[in-house]
Image: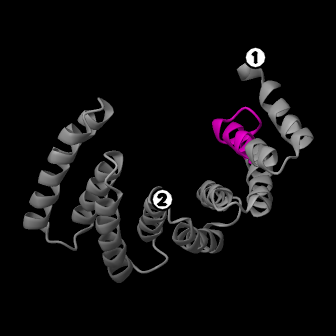
Amino acid sequence: MGNLALTHFHLGDYEKAKELQTLVLQKRTTLLGQDHPETLRAMGNLARKYSDLGDYEKAKELETLVLQKRTTLLGQDHPDTLIAIGNLAFTHANLGDFEKAKELEIVVLEKRTTLLGQDHPETLIAMGNLAFTHSNLGDFEKAKELGIVVLETRRQLFGDEHPHSIRAMHNLAHTYRKLQKLKEAEEVEQLVTDSPKLR
């Protein structure tokens, strides 16, 4: 049933996906209990369906519950707990609460840096998310600082043609434009243009 919900999601039928995901959550809660990892996964999936439909308050409610339960059951440093923190941060950003999103994203970045290292792809995603939030808060200098680290590390790890590197280039160029540093923005954009895959 969860796979069918995912199919409806990919077809753009978010209401049907939400309906099916609600049934999955109800069944898993009944059969496995509300603290079972699969029940919490179903709850997180339902939160995403609410988010897709623009009901960020309901998504926040479910994601907060998932985070509380995962923290209690798995601990603060477990990968599933960090995913829950990141999902809640994303929802706070969608609600326009960028300060709360920043607070949560800092936790994710610090823990991923400690647990996985600064060069790990998951750490770089967390750093990129935090840079984006700083940009939404108007702190373009901090966004630039983080964006440079993300871009340089992704280029070293993946090369210039990898989609993650190209996304980091676009994000950094956007930040430079916000800072009125048009020469730097153009230089970063030139890296994208010079990529053989994009010619």
Magenta span contains residue 31: no
Q: Which residue is mark 2?
A: 90
Residue 113, picture quadrant: bottom right
Q: Residue at x 29, y 29 (%)?
A: 11
Type of residue at label 1? Arg
Of residues 120 and 173, the one nearer the viewer is 173
Q: Is residue 124 left or right of residue 66?
A: right
Residue 174, picture quadrant: top right
Q: Which residue is mark 1?
A: 199
Q: Position of residue 18 (x, y in %)?
A: 21, 47
Residue 150, relative to residue 3: is it above or below? below
Of residues 26 and 184, the one nearer the viewer is 184
- Density class for disc 2 (Cα within 10 Å; few <14, some 14-19, many ≥20) is many
Residue 167, picture quadrant: top right
Q: Magenta stretch?
A: 157-171
Residue 99, relative to residue 90: is it above or below? below
Which residue reaches farthest right?
Answer: 183
Secondary element type, mark 1: loop
Type of residue at label 2? Phe
